[in-house]
Image (tube, grey):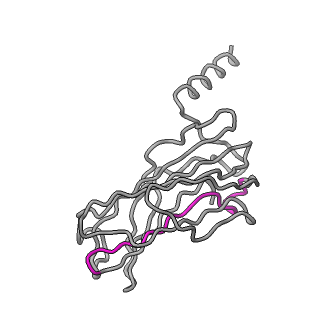
Amino acid sequence: MKKIVSVLMILCMLLMNVIPCFASSTGTNCPQNTVIAYLSNDNGNIIELNGELIAQPQLLSAENNEYSATYMVAVPRARRETTSIESDPSLASTVYLTVRYNVSGNQYLLTGVAGYWEIEDVNVSVTSSKVDYSCHANEHVFGRTVRNNFSFSTNFSQYTPDNGGYSTVGATLHLKYRMDSDTWNFDLSNNVLG
């Protein structure tokens, strides 16, 4: 009877495209509900922004055991003297970053990265956009130039074990904003591990 109930629960989760958190030797591996993104300028001002997991990891392919997870960050309008988001609550843009990954036991393989941003203020623009992504000590790419609404496969082949935070599997999006005459750097990471 327990076996039938377990099978029915798994089938229900697959039909709803919802997955449970993965148990590993180092604990439970669930995406965090929030992450911290950073907005900084040349004056040394750094603003911490909360990024939100906008949906629990979605099953993309049962055959490959492939999932995706997406974070969203609302980026405030900032001025050169800004040191906190309270000083200018208006919105400059909204940024989304998605990673796709395969799971095999307690090992992970980064298979793709996607993202986009929406400009909310006519005096704001993105002048540079790059992505760093890694899956293993020997499989990483730094500073890949991307355009808005990007999506690509990583072509990585080595799975990375969950070894308690000593490995990173994920991506970081780096945007350079022009807000009036000021330049601000934005960094958002979406890591399955690390």
Q: Residue furthest bottom?
A: 43
* Region in magenta: 162-181
Q: Quadrant of the N terminus?
A: top right
Residue 48 pos. (x, y %): 40, 68
150 or 117: nearer the eye? 150
122 or 49: nearer the eye? 122
Q: Quadrant of the C terminus?
A: bottom right
Q: Quadrant of residue 167?
A: bottom right
Residue displayed at 27% across by 60% down: 120
192 or 182: nearer the eye? 182
Tell me if residue 179 is in the magenta stretch.
yes
Residue displayed at 72% across by 46% down: 106
Up-down: is 185 above or below 136?
A: below
Tell me if residue 95 is in the magenta stretch.
no
Residue displayed at 27% across by 68% down: 77
Up-down: is 31 above or below 11?
A: below
Number of numbered discs overlaid on the protein picture: 0
Residue 110 pos. (x, y %): 65, 53
Q: Quadrant of residue 7?
A: top right
Residue 98 pos. (x, y %): 51, 51
* Relative side of 3 to 18, left or right: right
Q: Residue furthest front?
A: 147
Residue displayed at 39% across by 58% down: 117
Q: Quadrant of residue 137?
A: bottom right
Residue 53 pos. (x, y %): 46, 49
